[in-house]
Amino acid sequence: MPKQIRYLDRNKEPTMEAGLRVKTYKEYSYGFSPTLALDEAQRCLFCKDADQRCIKACPINVDIPGFIKKITEGNILGAYEIILKSDPFPSICGRVCPQERQCEGSCILFYDTVKDRKNKGLPVSIGALEKFVGDTVRLMGIKPDLKKEPPNGKRVAIVGAGPAGLSCAHELAILGYSIDIYEALPVAGGVMVYGIPTARLDRSIIEWEVNRLKSLGVRFFFGRAIGRGLSVKELLNSYDAVFLAVGAGRGKLGIKGENLNGVFSAIEVLMRVGLMGAGRGADTPIDLGQKTAIIGGGFTAVDCAITTLRLGIQTHVVYRRTRDTSLARQEEWDHIEEEGAILHWLTQPIEILGKEKVEGLKCVKMKLEGLDSQGRPKPVAIEGSEHIIECDSVIFAIGQGANPIAYEELPNLELTKYLTIKVDEGFRTSVPRLYAGGDAVNGGDTVVRAIAEGKKCAMSIHQDLTSGVKR
């Protein structure tokens, strides 16, 4: 009897009611129960060409039908072990990956690549299933057999304990390398700690993954800002290879009023609230006033909105394109809109108003015409559509800026025109035995892309250090 194809009855992940979640910093998505996970897993068609569909669309090529099949068999540990071959952090990726633009966007239930037909139905909830598997293993205290190789006598230094650095450390530690991670902050996680609110990613998950790395022999040195004291040159003299995973800063628009009091970068707001406890009983100051305008249309903008809404601030999000062309997930826009965020689509800021402090944001309405150089719909200003959004602060959640402190003393290190680190296909820099990946290379992207680049860099380091070829 042929399997019934369930196009539309996708199980929705249970979440806290909007009126309650906006009052707490606790994670608001509850995750699948075993019953819901099993039912959702049974929707999967286990496509024979999944390597050209969901697997190919995943930046780290997780065997998606393979782990989902294990769920239907009741073998959660088996599912976890399959995921771990490609993704070292299932509980994290299950929460923060933009699945609808990656694996789920290529699911045959949603998108038939052969007939080029979209919206047939609703894709399998791959992200929620991955989260379920990771959480089950973590909360039950199950310890999978990682088959760690014996020590090979080689040492690698990693600068930055964000997703790229942690991913690289995981792969190399399993291969028998001695790994030391140097992190400027007092905790590991990088953008996952200072950039993603606890409402989306509980910190206990990151702590668990860090402890798992420690159990593999990875050593962490916190409060060590490379470039301020210890240099990359010194690391290269002490280690067989060095991986730079220092992340990047947030950029600005270059409009009038950017230097007024009340203008913040997203990192500044997220770090003050998420890491230092501003507005949550700590002494760290954060004065955003009663109304704030967040500029941007990606995950960082959503994360800022989640944060400011929980501070009791009227929150406007301003983006020059449309919701369906934004980079954040649709359900994330749903969540913050339910919580009271005011979303301004096709709206371009052109000036921040005020004498000494922010008093408003002057904007112009946009329309989409044609494509830009990256193939995305191009926003064009509508004449005579200028208007003002009243606000007491402005938060820039757009673009990326280079973070060169760690590598500014390396004159032979080649950079791109955007001042990010230039690498080859194996994430090798122009400096021998020095590698780089994550936001320091790509200018700022998703957590899963950083994880993918960390894994690829680990394979390059392993190949170079075992081949005997000097570079």
Image (tube, grey):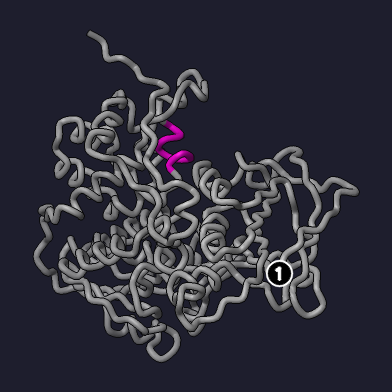
Residue at x 49% of width, y 85% of height: 409
Q: Is residue 305 above or below residue 332?
A: below
Q: Is residue 352 above or below residue 425?
A: below
Q: Nearer the viewer, residue 32 or 433?
A: 32
Residue 467: image x %, image y %?
A: 23, 62
Quadrant in the picture for residue 466: bottom left
Magenta part mainly helix, strand or loop? helix
Q: Nearer the viewer, residue 317 or 391?
A: 391
Question: What range of the chain is rendered magenta?
Answer: 99-106
Residue 383: image x %, image y %?
A: 89, 47
Image position of 200 (left or right of 355): left
Residue 294: image x %, image y %?
A: 64, 60
Q: Nearer the viewer, residue 328 or 344?
A: 344
Residue at x 48% of width, y 40% of height: 101
- The residue that disc 1 covers is 392
Residue type at tag 1: Asp
Q: Quadrant of the C terminus?
A: bottom left
Image position of 25 (left or right of 373): left
Residue 150, visible in the rendered structure: yes
